[in-house]
Amino acid sequence: MDRGCLTSQRVDRLTIGIAAGGLASFALLYAPQPVLPHLAHEFQVTPGQASLVIGIATGALAVAVIPLSLLSEVVGRRPLILSSVIVAAVIGLCLPYVGDFPLLVALRAVQGVAIAGFPAVAMAYLAEQGRLKAIGMLVAGNSFGGMVGRLIAGQVGTYREGTGLVAVCAAAATVVLIWALPKRTEAVTRTTGGLKDAVTRPLLWALYAVAFLGMGSFVALYNSVGFRLASPPLELSPQVASLVFVAYAVGGFASATTGRHPNRRTVLFGMLGVTAVGVILTIPTHIVPIAIGFVLLTAGWFAAHAAAGAWVNTVAPSKGPASGLYTGAYYAGACIGGTAGTMVYAALGWSALIAVSLSWLSVGALGVLLTFRRNTRSSAKNLSRKTGAPLAR
């Protein structure tokens, strides 16, 4: 067998392993989302309190991402990926048997820490293997896992049975991960002082802000839509309402397609615009514009996320810490913005949530635009000093 065939097999196996890990991790992370109304009824808590089951997991994930990304510099990417997904799957199998809400929230926090090892490492792992364009496929796999988890739980319609079935599927995906992830990869040289580089570049901070604000808006809308669809005048069943998560399939396709585009700046701004249009389309109290709106906002946000994540790994000298900070901001947004947005919906309604979401998206886009222009001007000035040529006006 020739060298090209061996390389192709290694790449295929790497893709399969990462996809399986993403499916397991994100199915477990978001499985309770479509059954939040049922969970709130079963545990006799408010919508805002019920959303903590999502918020605490994503918050714990956000806090743990940076330490785990640094740990991967010592123990290696592969061992951290495997241990992360295995522990998360085991906890997922235990959660349906918990009958106390505070204990449920606590275990979800532990599960969030466990899950953090996968997104903390996956982007850097692909970048170090020379697979930067595959980050779009990584986001697509993550979104597919989130969709599968939500759809399975939503179609079952009850919290315990739904999340239990998701956990079984995630455990099966974990077995695939263990089998498929290559045991030997090329040696990589990791730079020291990577965390300093990751926190001293303004453009990276602007991209972290996009992750935080965009994901906060996205999760707040998905947290709240189940309550909206179950309320008058729509009054849809949990099974029908959960079909909104089919939009994740479009989001996965969009991220896989745009992730290969070389102009990440154009993709980022364009897809944030598509996200905003989708958000606006959900305003009417009719199922058709709501469905179209969620397809657009999901496709737009996942494509924007893929572009921003790839941009971070292009700009950053050290991939691990920068990727960890970006991922931490992403899930901090899911926790803080997702929970805050759900509370806005509970107190003020859907229109108020739309206004908040659009403002967050606008601030994120404006921050990247201004920082990029400032970097461009600074680079031009430095070039002018070195060459003695006047600046173009």
Image (cartoon, rainbow, N blue to C red):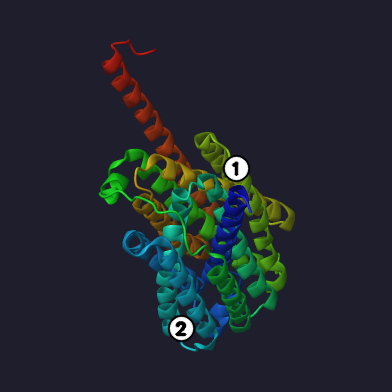
Of the two numbered discs 1 and 2 in the rendering, the one whose residue sits closer to the viewer: 1
Q: Is residue 242 above or below residue 319?
A: below
Residue at the spot 52% in from the left edge and 59% down from the top edge: 219
* Residue under label 1: 258
Q: Are marks 1 and 2 in contact (CB under 8 Å)?
A: no
Q: Residues within 10 Å of mark 1 (few under 14, many from 20)?
A: many
x%, y% of residue 317? 34, 43
Identity of the residue drawn at 59% across and 81% down: 164
- In the depicted structure, whether residue 300 falls above or below residue 232: above
What residue is at 33 percent from the left and 59 percent from the top? 73
x and y, in percent, of residue 316 in the image: 37, 43
- Examine the rendering and report whether any part of residue 336 can be seen: no
Q: In the rendered image, which quarter contains the C terminus? A: top left
Residue at figure coordinates x 48%, y 46% from the top left? 130
- Kindly identify the amino acid type of the residue bearing the numbered disc 1: Thr
Q: 235 or 369, which is in the foreground?
A: 369
Name above or below for residue 87 compared with residue 241.
below
Could you tell me which secondary element the residue under label 2 belongs to? helix
Q: Nearest the camera: 17 or 2? A: 2
Residue closest to the far front: 1
Nearer the N terminus, badge 1 or badge 2? 2
Q: CA distance from mark 1 to mark 2?
A: 41 Å
Left or right: where 79 falls relative to 350:
left
Image quarter in which the N terminus is found: bottom right
Q: Position of residue 389 (x, y in %)?
A: 32, 10
Circle 1 SS class: helix
Which of 80/48 is in front? 80
Query: In the rendering, at what x and y percent does residue 192 appear?
Result: 26, 50
State the residue position of label 2.
101
What's the residue type where badge 2 is placed? Phe
Vertical placement of 164 versus 276: above or below? below
